[in-house]
Image: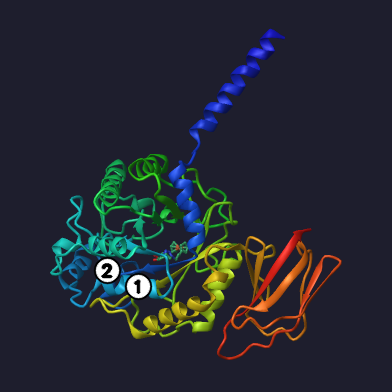
């Protein structure tokens, strides 16, 4: 008996030790998560020397450009029309609450004054720290800044390209030390989290380069990413800084939000987002056409209506919508993007209360639209014509005290019977992408 209880004691001790080894977010971090989950709308910016060929940010990989040849782009990067104040106010006027900026993409170019790589903005003819310019403006205009940072590198010899899925065509022959690469990333992240004021989050990408494709028997990464160490460093430098990693897997310990690329959470229409939505704050990132970085031939712009649908459905899933622009190499954001951002801002000016600070609906988005909720107020977003009544099964309240259109307060007919709510059929109008019905509810079912 005594022996047994000793065994149980030892077992419990081990269990608590292993639980302690897991990640416990700080108070600041939890508050930042709450802020993030309420923010709902952000601007993704893919920009750098990769913008010059006008062929997207994967041009180095797709055209097998060698490191030597690619380096020439640094000499051409001189975005004389770049105006950080204009970009930040454009995001704010679009109703966005944060900006996620590429600081270093897979091509390895650093957009800031870094001590740890010569392939950086200070060695371009532009010669000014772009991360600093944007960070200063964000702080001045009161919008949060998240930093995209690539774990994958198509340039460095110490990046394990010989086990990677991409970056084989860039002419590298030397196999460097992986531990040097980890140290390099930690040094750069330390700069980013020390010299640019408060950072809302770090957005990692490229982890998948070392992981076998979805469906493979063994998907353990081919390298040790040292994520525990890297995440601990970030949280030590800035406890409120949220960490997300676009690895297309379930969240790993130390991560604070979960993203879905070119997809709404759980839908996996893109074939990149097999992971199930977790309890962490969620974010869907989407391009305005089909490219992240500037692409001179890609005119497949989403319509304003499609963008509103995405924002509303993301909110209906309880997720943020991170909408991308790929500015041109001269620093100008093309009019097709600016017009759409202005449209979003205008729409949110009227309908923002049905998006910001809401939670996802009690049911997931449907063919007809999506639901968001705030306290006992429910917002029913009708995105597509419903010729018959909208039937909400298992309605979570027993009573509706008021039902009206958010736009003009005109009342809407509803009937709540046996736990199912029927809402009158709604005819869409061409100039309204979303008919928002406000339901003031009472008495939880
Ligand atoms: O920064 C943007 C893109 O450059 C980057 N993430 C967004 C935010 C991105 N990386 N990859 N992708 C987008 C598309 C992914 C392609 C993949 Fe594959 C298909 C990854 C795994 C299968 C290509 C082929 C890479 C590995 C094999």
Quickly name the residue at label 1: 293
Chain-order first, disc 2 or disc 1 = 2
Measured from the top left, where is residue 49 in percent x and y? Answer: 24, 70
Q: Report the disc number at residue 80.
A: none
Q: Can residue 257 be seen from the camera position used here?
A: no
Q: Nearer the viewer, residue 236 or 123?
A: 236
Q: Is residue 435 above or below residue 122?
A: below
Mark 2 residue crowding within 10 angstroms, few (<14) / some (14–19) / many (20+): many
> In the image, residue 86 lies at what x, y percent?
28, 75
Check mark 1 vs ligand 1: CB closer than 8 Å? yes or no: yes
Q: For this rendering, which residue is in front, 155 or 414? A: 414
Taking the image as shown, residue 38 lies to the left or right of residue 188, namely right
The answer to which quarter of the image holds residue 58 is bottom left
Residue 203: x and y in percent read 40, 56
Residue 236 lies, in percent from the top left, at: 36, 40
Image quarter for residue 57? bottom left
Separation of disc 2 and disc 1 at Cα?
Answer: 8 Å
Ligand 1 position by quadrant: bottom left
Could you tell me which secondary element the residue under label 1 belongs to?
A: loop
Question: Which of these two is toward me, 158 or 363?
Answer: 363
Q: What residue occupies the far top of the structure in this picture?
A: 2
Quadrant (top left, top right, bottom left, bottom right) of the C terminus: bottom right
> From the viewer's perspective, is residue 429 above or below residue 43?
below
Of 442 and 49, the residue lying toward us? 442
Q: Is residue 258 visible?
A: yes
Disc marking residue 48 = 2
Dots 2 and 1: beta carbons under 8 Å? yes
Q: Is residue 272 above or below residue 10?
A: below
**Residue depicted at 72% across the width and 9% down the height:** 1
Q: Secondary structure at mark 2?
A: loop
């Amino acid at each position: 008996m005594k022996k047994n209880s000793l065994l149980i004691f030892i077992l419990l001790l081990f269990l608590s030790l292993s639980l302690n080894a897991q990640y416990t977010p700080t108070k600041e971090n939890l508050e930042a998560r709450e802020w993030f989950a309420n923010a709902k709308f952000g601007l993704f910016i893919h920009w750098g020397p990769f913008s010059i060929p006008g062929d997207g940010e994967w041009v180095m990989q797709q055209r097998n450009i060698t490191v030597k040849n690619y380096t020439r782009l640094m000499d051409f990067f001189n975005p004389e029309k770049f105006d950080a104040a204009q970009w930040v106010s454009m995001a704010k006027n679009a109703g966005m609450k944060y900006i996620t900026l590429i600081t270093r993409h897979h091509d390895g170019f650093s957009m800031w004054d870094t001590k740890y790589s010569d392939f950086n903005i200070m060695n371009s003819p532009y010669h000014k720290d772009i991360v600093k310019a944007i960070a200063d403006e964000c702080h001045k205009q009161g919008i949060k800044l998240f930093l995209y940072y690539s774990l994958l590198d198509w340039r460095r010899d110490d990046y394990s390209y010989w086990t990677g899925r991409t970056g084989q065509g860039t002419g590298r022959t030397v196999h460097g030390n992986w531990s040097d690469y980890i140290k390099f990333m930690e040094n750069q992240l330390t700069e980013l989290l020390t010299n640019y004021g408060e950072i809302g989050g770090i957005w990692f990408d490229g982890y998948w380069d070392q992981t076998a494709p979805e469906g493979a028997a063994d998907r353990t990464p081919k390298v040790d990413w040292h994520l525990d160490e890297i995440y601990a460093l970030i949280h030590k430098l800035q406890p409120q800084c949220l960490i997300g990693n676009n690895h297309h897997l379930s969240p790993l310990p130390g991560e604070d939000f979960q993203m879905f690329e070119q997809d709404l959470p759980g839908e996996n229409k893109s074939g990149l987002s097999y992971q199930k939505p977790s309890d962490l704050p969620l974010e869907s990132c989407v391009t305005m056409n089909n490219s992240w970085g500037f692409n001179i031939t890609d005119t497949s712009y989403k319509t304003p209506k499609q963008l509103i649908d995405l924002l509303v459905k993301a909110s209906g899933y309880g997720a943020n919508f991170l909408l991308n622009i790929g500015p041109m190499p001269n620093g100008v954001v093309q009019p097709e993007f600016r017009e759409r951002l202005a449209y979003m801002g205008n729409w949110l000016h009227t309908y923002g209360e049905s998006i910001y600070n809401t939670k996802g609906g009690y049911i997931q988005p449907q063919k007809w639209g999506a639901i968001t909720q705030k306290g006992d107020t429910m917002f029913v977003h009708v995105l597509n014509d419903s010729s018959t009544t909208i039937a909400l099964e298992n309605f979570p309240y027993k009573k509706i005290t008021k039902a009206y259109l958010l736009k003009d307060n005109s009342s809407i007919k509803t009937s709540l019977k046996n736990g199912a709510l029927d809402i009158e059929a709604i005819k869409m109008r061409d100039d309204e992408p979303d008919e928002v019905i406000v339901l003031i509810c009472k008495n939880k079912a």
